[in-house]
Amino acid sequence: MSDTPRLTELDIVAHSNSSRADYITKAVSADEAWVYIADDCIAGYAVINRSFFSRVTIEMLLIDTKHRRSGIGTMLLRHLEEICDSDELWTSTNLSNTPMQRLLMKLEYEMAGFVNNLDPGDPELVFYKKLSMPR
Ligand SMILES: CC(C)(COP(=O)(O)OP(=O)(O)OC[C@H]1O[C@@H](n2cnc3c(N)ncnc32)[C@H](O)[C@@H]1OP(=O)(O)O)[C@@H](O)C(=O)NCCC(=O)NCCS
């Protein structure tokens, strides 16, 4: 729980949106959050749970702006694949989020479909990856 203030600091959405701050607190309380530590400071976090049709799902992945494009998102995703207790892993991102889509394609996630009308004019793309060695 002591990590929660730092997660709220690095996730700028939480600065102006109390429901994101509550989301972070709940994810940490539920042991669903993982952090990446660089130089003794949290540089990114991810949340994994079963929120999508009860499938193991990466619900959140966020890297501190000054640490982006240094491989941390890749390392966090790979860690979640290692601890995943299923042979498949699901996630989603907006059509407008090119960085996340490129990261997912690089790690060989496949697009499974899309959902309209969650964010106006910006469909949610759903991705999944078949894992060869579930834990
Ligand atoms: C998407 C995000 C998690 C990527 O994290 P990251 O640590 O910067 O990613 P990595 O450094 O591991 O990048 C791996 C690959 O992803 C792709 N990528 C990452 N950022 C990119 C960008 N800005 N533009 C294009 N491709 C990008 C590239 O293919 C990159 O490989 P390369 O650097 O060898 O070209 C990060 O930009 C972020 O936190 N964004 C805001 C939150 C968000 O949108 N989360 C996802 C939805 S929940």
Image: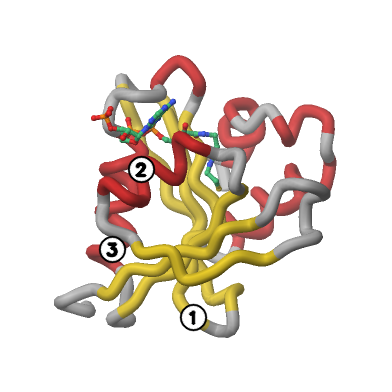
* Label 1 residue SS: strand
Looking at the rendered structure, the kind of residue marked 2 is Leu
- Left or right: 48 in relation to 76: right
Q: Position of residue 134 (x, y in %)?
A: 22, 79
In the picture, the disc for residue 55 is 1
Q: Say which of marks 2 and 1 sits in front.
A: 2
Q: Determine if the C-beta at disc 2 is less than 8 A from ligand 1.
A: yes
Q: Determine if the C-beta at disc 3 is less than 8 A from ligand 1.
A: no
Q: Position of residue 8 (x, y in %)?
A: 65, 34
Judge by depth and name the residue closer to the eye, 48 or 37. Answer: 48
Q: Position of residue 100 (x, y in %)?
A: 46, 42
In the picture, the disc for residue 81 is 3
Residue drawn at x 28%, y 75% as measured from the top left: 130
Question: Counting residues from the N terminus, which is met first, the one under dot 1 or under dot 3?
Answer: 1
In the picture, the disc for residue 96 is none
Residue holding disc 2: 103
**Badges 1 and 3: C-beta atoms under 8 Å apart?**
no
Ligand 1: quadrant of the figure: top left
